[in-house]
Amino acid sequence: MEFFVISLLNGVSYGLLLFMLSSGLTLIFSMMGVLNFAHASFYMLGAYLAYTLGLKIGFFPALFLAPPLAGLVGALVERYGLRKVHRYGHVPELLFTFGLAYLIEESVKVVWGLAAVPYRVPEFLDGHLFTLYSTSFPKLRGFMMLVALAMLAAVYLLLTRTRIGLVIQAALTHPQTVEALGHNVPRVFMLVFGGGCALAGLAGVIGGVAFVTEPSMAASVGPIVFVVAVVGGMGSLAGAFLASLLIGILQTFAIALDWSLAGMLAAVGIHVSEQTFLYSLWKLQLSQVAPVLPYLLLVLMLIFRPKGLLGTRAD
Amino acid sequence: MKYQPLNLARWIIWGATALLMAVLPLVFTQGFAITLMSQMGIAIIFTLSYNMLLGQSGMLSFGHAVYSGLGAYIAVHVLNMSSKGQLWMPVSLLPLVGGLAGAFFGVLFGYVTTKRAGTTFAMITLGIGELVFSCSLMFPEFFGGEGGVTTNRVFGQPFLGISFGPATQVYYLIALWCLASMALMYAWSHTPLGRMANAVRDNPERAEFVGYDTQKVRWLTLIISAFFAGVAGALGCINFEIVTAENVSAIRSGGVLLAAFIGGVGFFFGPIIGACVFVYFVVALSDHTRAWQLYLGLFFILTVMFAPGGIASLVMMQLPVIARKRFGELLPHYARTGAAGLLVLAALILTVEMTYKVSVDSADGTAMSLFGVEFDAAGALPWTVAGGLWLVGGWLFHRARRRLARTWGDIQAEIAGVKA
Amino acid sequence: MIQFSIRAAVRSTLCAAALASASTVAQAQTVKLALIDPQSGLMAPVGLNQLHSWQYIAEIANQKNWAGGPKFEIVGFDNKLSPQESLTVLKQAIDQGIRYILQGNGSSVALALQDAVQKHNERNPGKEIIFLNYAAVDPDMTNSKCTYWHFRLDANSDMKMEALTTYLAKDKNVKNVYLLNQNYSFGQAVARGAKEYLARKRPDIKIVGEDLHPLAQIKDFAPYVSKIKAAGADTVITGNWGSDLALLIKAAKDAGLNVNFYTYYAATTGVPTAMGAAGEDKVHYVGYWNVNNAKFVGADVAMGYDKKYHDDFYTMATYTGIAMLAKAFKETKSTDPVKVAKALEGMKVESLNGEVEMRKTDHQALQPLYIAKWVKVNGKDVKYDQEKTGYGWKTEALLDTYVATQPTSCQMKRPN
């Protein structure tokens, strides 16, 4: 029971971090049709900026300052880079962000060096929130969940309750009409791109302190963010939320279980030994396969339900 | 469309390519140059096979390394069995094995991936790429784990004095296969299937309406493309005598995408240029500077932004101008823009290298040398020079580019006028 | 014989100066050593640290004229941690006339280089090259796959496991052990070794769980930690390195997991920063040296290194390597790899951890091993910290050479 509850909590909190990361990607994609390959790079940028700012002004001010800064970089990239490429079509746009990911990673190395930076947990988040049976649940993870939920609420309110949110939603489906009504659609795009990057930056502030802040942190989360956005359904924030939790919990529980095909066969009376054909396949444990599961889910989802869990369009 | 002079030009181009490939190792006899050229040959096949998907059929794949990598793995196992005498397979025919293996996996994965086009296709290939890569570390029996599978290409008695021990012999084997693959892939683009692939790229609805099964066209194209990727993989296996998991990794898949795009996906010869430039960046440039990835990324982004047709399109744009004997007018502008561009490039290199020196590499002091000049990266003077280069170079470049654009526009307008 | 105290250093410098002035006829020859290791990418910090270590030791050796004439120069080549890329740069190094290859990061790269060097030497008689492996620890390299031109300066994975389990076996509090490793040849070798040696030494210790996870892909180790907890482990043995180790220890601390970690690589660049206070009193490593040893042997080297590179010197094998080469140059009065390789066989030198012998049968260095624990710097037995964290490694045990020495299955083919 202890194991189950703690694993569930772990899964949910990891899922929520994934959601913070992928929500920006989903927003950008649904608005502009751009799959931002550099999205995880803004996650990294957020972490590094928060680390540098945190040295001067402390963790909390940095928490509020670093994401807008990452967003500003994103907006500039959109204004002076992506917008130029926009007219060539979606593939060059995608390739642009692909190259951008390279560039950001290298720039981070030039500025902050090749090794991990000592981005530490602030003292009052360092400790245990509560202890369940005998396992303690760290404050930082609780904080991570809180920020993610607050962010979800804020984004939801922004999109449904404000004027700009309504324009964004309208531009989502009918860009020409919105433009005809006199709204500056390119500027809305810039805002959305910057906003999406800021969300990734926020995830970075938390993720960087929870894990390790180093130049390869973007590359290590990059593919999984895509999986979440695609599985949830391109352009669906609710879908991204659902998919994040699903993948978070799936991965956590898969690691926990030592099931293997050999074990299952043994349960029905078939014994598998090292001499058996394809033994390495049979002996593979679910926990070993766990990190691969999201990709498997991605491929299956794309084959059988390409619009994703809650998505509205296939491409 | 087919008239004699065009074909003659074609023969000359192909002949010259073959001659160049034959002569190059006689000019550059250094071992490293041979290695570089061998890798370029392999990269050319791989990038061309990739462009069958991206350029000719409009399929953006993020997992093309799967086919070359798995082809290489099958090839290395066959080679090892062959050297143990368990089966007969001469080294020179090994690429065929790799190709067939690649095609086999093309049939398998392609059935799944080509069901969709566009972004969905791209995402599925990404997923499959990650899956195969993760599996490669999970099944060490086949993939050899982290260390990969090693082999020895020299076994048995030399045939006509060819043992494939010396790198030059391997280079010629690669050159032969490269030439054959180039010719075959070029021929493919003129077959009905190749033409249909173009149609499916440009207007899938219409192609479907005319009665073609677009999914089948994509699938068949992918299988053929996977075949050539497998050939490239097997040649890599012969060249390096080792196959590791990185052969199926996302880095390799991303690299071939970069190479194809830099060269230009719109023309057949684009990826050939791209492959050579890319290999040069990765292999040669990385020995001169640690910031090579920064330059590569920047180069790629600039290509996407300002020359989305790649290097090939820049070359092809000159042809009508040359044909009308107006190239002479452009030449001084090119020279001026190029010179100004070199100033900007120098400013960039200076800035990047000095930043690297100061931030990452300052242990031995900040003294460094660049372009044969010794200076102190922490000093004010070099930074002033860099700043000055940026300003002057940037201004000159901007001016030269504007003039070039004006002249270019005039000539284009005249050409268009002549046509009309 | 090489001495370490400052007085001895001064003396030898003076001697060298006297010798050099005496025999000005002997021309100063420079021997280039190619270091093929990652200098860009994920493992670049480690690779650069080690490049600097080699350069620093070479500098000392040149100053003190260890080799009696020849000077050392380390040339760094970036292999991006890729076996294939390594073979390309190997060719480049050979083209530049370099006859000595140094490499350490990753058994995958080392195996590829070992193989390539062997092939090169077979195909190009008269142009032989020597491969000094200073950190790749796959036992196969000095057993079933051993070759004449490969020399390993580090203790291999099995030797380290032997030392580790010998130390563990004495601790009666250890009852339930969990094995968590990266899923590739090295991680599997660690897991296999741990099971085998523990069963031999302490059959009462239970292996309560075993996991292999993909290399450098896990971001969240919390699930593994709760699994370790659920299994009731009191000790975790892991061969994890880089971020895989740092994240594991961080997650363990967050969940309040109270177990001891026994590692191979907790002292390498990046890990100390990442674990910080989280690893205090819990993390141990087994290795061939610790700067906080009984007499602080090598502390002057570490301090000098820190002063120059603002980094920690931990790859002590660089010292052993240069010392061995220097001795071989001196003995043979030659820098020809064929002669040097012969001289290296069975050679003994005094390194920072005591006497190191290059065993003739398999070219595996035999040396004393250390077990150390991550504790707060106290100025007494733990003087030096790592990565300015305020924590350092306290020597828990110094195991004599014979303890970890393993038999070898190597059947060396020697050129005649």
Image (tube, coloured by chain):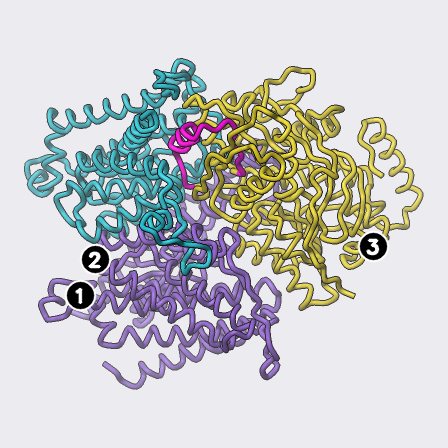
Chain colours: A cyan, B purple, C yellow
The chain containing the residue under callout 1 comes to B
At a point 39% along the width and 73% down the height, the residue shown is B182
State the residue position of label 2.
B117
Q: Is residue A249 above or below residue B252?
A: above
Visible residue check, residue B327: no
State the CA–CA distance, disc 2 to disc 1: 9 Å
Q: Which type of secondary structure does the marked residue at label 3 adopt?
A: loop
The chain containing the residue under callout 2 comes to B
Q: Is residue A3 above or below residue B207?
A: above
**Residue A174 as seen in the image, left or right of residue B339:** left
Image mark for residue C334: 3
In terms of depth relative to the viewer, which is nearer, A125 or B405?
A: A125
Q: Which residues are magenta?
A: C217-239
In terms of depth relative to the viewer, which is nearer, A82 or B114?
A: B114
State the residue position of label 1.
B214
Cβ–Cβ under 8 Å for marks 2 and 1: yes
Cβ–Cβ under 8 Å for marks 2 and 3: no
Image mark for residue C80: none
Q: Amino acid at mark 2?
A: Ala
- Residue A134 position, x and y percent, is 39, 19
